[in-house]
């Protein structure tokens, strides 16, 4: 068995807060220099690497002399703004000693939910990679609030892997990988070396964050692997403290937990639809429409919709639920919630008569729809 990184050309490497900041003690210069050194060697060997780094809040707290993580969102945002300066300074210094440029990219959920901004981010990232620059990504903590933030960078890492259609996502953390239970609480837990990403059994093994510095714990890593697998990316969860971990993985050594992407790759546009973490609204389908989507691969017509919820606009992503309320698909709507409420249960040839105009015969075209 060889490492899933052996043949990967384009990778996303994510490093967690506890690693980057030495458990909140301040930026770990030695560790950061070691990852930069490894990434530089990977780039020199022809690979493309995007770095997703946490640690802004923890480093900001350290710089401001705050002992306790604040609860107030404005204080967290202030800490992130201070800490992000330290993070990028450190990465720039470390990578420039290898003759490599770095680029700071701060993303929010809204950036990836908006199709134009999503495509802009993708083009910029690809351009940077083609130029041999190392993009250093974090969430734009200063402008996001609790309801709209990714929160943990595992999720962000998987969305970035999907965005650039990376071959692998490497999540470096403070444990050697995934165990059958949190090893901090269950020292006898078994190590998981190989699994298929998306196996529901993994979610039961994974617990929350191990320290007050990290967020999300193993569960967000397992869910990130499931998400990344949809675009064909394998995930490796490994210890960032293991010497030369990235190099050894790239040479074929099996370190950490390898979560293989089992499923067929979803088209990039459909992947973008699936990656929406928050949806603008809901349409409830009758049984016939649900069947047409699930079994016939058909578009959703207004006649198959029995109710509408939320206040979405044309072009937003909505959830399609069956009569029992279970989500079966999601897609880009051609009509707003108000318009949909007026044309639901009606045949498409009546749309013009009801609304005074017609955009499309379908409420959601099958090219803009993904089953979930
Ligand atoms: N099944 C598990 N296997 C390994 N670690 C686990 C498991 N469940 C929970 N954890 C915890 O997840 C922690 C890593 O996640 P987290 O604290 O969020 O770190 P990071 O900042 O690297 O994202 C570990 O320190 C560990 O205590
Ligand atoms: N964007 C935040 C990261 C949030 C976080 O704690 O993520 P992680 O440690 O990767 O679980 C920061 O830079 O502080």
Image: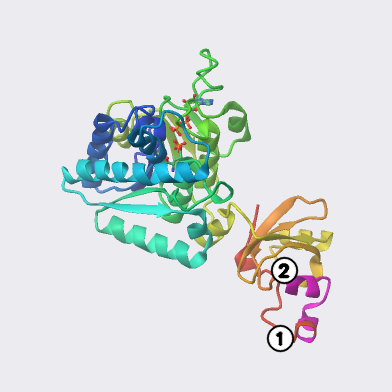
In the rendered view, tell whether residue 329 sits above or below residue 298.
Answer: above
In the rendered view, tell whether residue 327 sits above or below residue 223.
Answer: below
Q: Relative to residue 251, is residue 319 drawn left or right?
A: right
Q: Which residue is outermost to the top?
A: 188
Main SS category, magenta section: helix
Point out the stretch of residues depicted in magenta: 338-353
Task: State the mark number for residue 357.
Answer: 1
Q: Residue at x 49, y 27 (%)?
A: 178
Labels 2 & 1 near each other (Cβ < 8 A): no
Of 221 and 85, nearer the camera is: 85
Q: Quadrant of residue 318?
A: bottom right
Q: Ligand 2 near label 2 (Cβ, under 8 Å)?
A: no
Residue 90 seen in the figure: yes
Q: Residue at x 62, y 35 (%)?
A: 200
Estimate the x, y position of residue 344 in percent, counting from the top left.
80, 71
Label 1 neighbourhood size at 10 Å, few (<14), some (14-19), many (20+)? few
In the rendered view, tell whether residue 31 sits above or below residue 79.
Answer: above
Mark closer to the observer (2, 1): 2
Q: Badge 2 is on which residue? A: 337
Q: Relative to residue 143, is residue 199 drawn left or right?
A: right
Q: Relative to residue 354, is residue 244 drawn left or right?
A: left
The quarter of the picture where the N terminus appears is top left
Q: Residue at x 53, y 49 (%)?
A: 145
Estimate the x, y position of residue 48 in percent, counting from the top left.
30, 49
Of 92 and 315, nearer the camera is: 92
Say if the magenta span includes residue 348: yes
Picture quarter with ligand 2: top left
| Disc 1 element | loop
| Disc 2 element | helix
Q: Relative to residue 233, is residue 245 drawn left or right?
A: left
Estimate the x, y position of residue 3 in percent, counting from the top left.
38, 34
């Amino acid at each position: 068995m060889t490492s899933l990184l052996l043949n990967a050309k384009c990778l996303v490497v994510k490093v967690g807060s506890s690693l980057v900041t030495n458990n909140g003690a301040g930026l770990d210069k030695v560790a950061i220099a070691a990852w930069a050194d490894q990434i530089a060697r990977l780039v020199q060997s022809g690979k493309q690497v995007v770095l997703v780094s946490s640690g802004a809040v923890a480093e900001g707290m350290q710089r401001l002399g705050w002992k306790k993580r604040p609860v107030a969102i404005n204080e967290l945002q202030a800490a992130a703004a201070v800490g992000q300066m330290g993070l990028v300074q450190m990465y720039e210094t470390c990578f420039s000693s290898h003759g490599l440029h770095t680029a700071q990219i701060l993303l929010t959920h809204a950036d990836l939910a908006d199709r134009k901004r999503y495509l802009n981010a993708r083009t910029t990232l690809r351009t940077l990679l083609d130029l041999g620059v190392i993009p250093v990504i974090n969430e734009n903590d200063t402008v996001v609030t609790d309801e709209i933030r990714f929160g943990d960078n595992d999720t962000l890492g998987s969305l970035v892997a999907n965005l650039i259609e990376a071959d692998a996502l490497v999540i470096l953390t403070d444990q050697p990988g995934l165990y059958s239970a949190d090893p901090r609480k269950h020292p006898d837990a078994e190590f998981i070396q190989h699994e298929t990403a998306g196996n529901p059994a993994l979610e039961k093994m994974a617990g929350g964050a191990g320290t007050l510095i990290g967020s999300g714990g193993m569960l967000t890593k397992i869910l990130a692997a499931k998400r990344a697998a949809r675009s064909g990316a394998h995930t490796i969860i490994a210890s960032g403290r293991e010497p030369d971990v990235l190099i050894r993985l790239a040479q074929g050594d099996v370190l950490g937990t390898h979560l293989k992407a089992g499923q067929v790759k979803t088209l990039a546009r459909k992947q973008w639809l699936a990656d929406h973490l928050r949806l603008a609204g809901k349409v409830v389908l009758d049984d016939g429409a649900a069947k047409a989507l699930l079994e016939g691969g058909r578009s959703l017509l207004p006649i198959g919709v029995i109710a509408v919820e939320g206040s979405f606009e044309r072009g937003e992503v909505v959830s399609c639920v069956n009569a029992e309320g279970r989500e079966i698909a999601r897609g880009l709507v051609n009509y707003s919630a108000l318009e949909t409420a007026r044309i639901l249960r009606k045949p498409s040839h009546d749309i013009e008569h009801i609304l005074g105009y017609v955009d499309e015969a379908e409420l959601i075209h099958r090219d803009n729809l993904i089953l979930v």
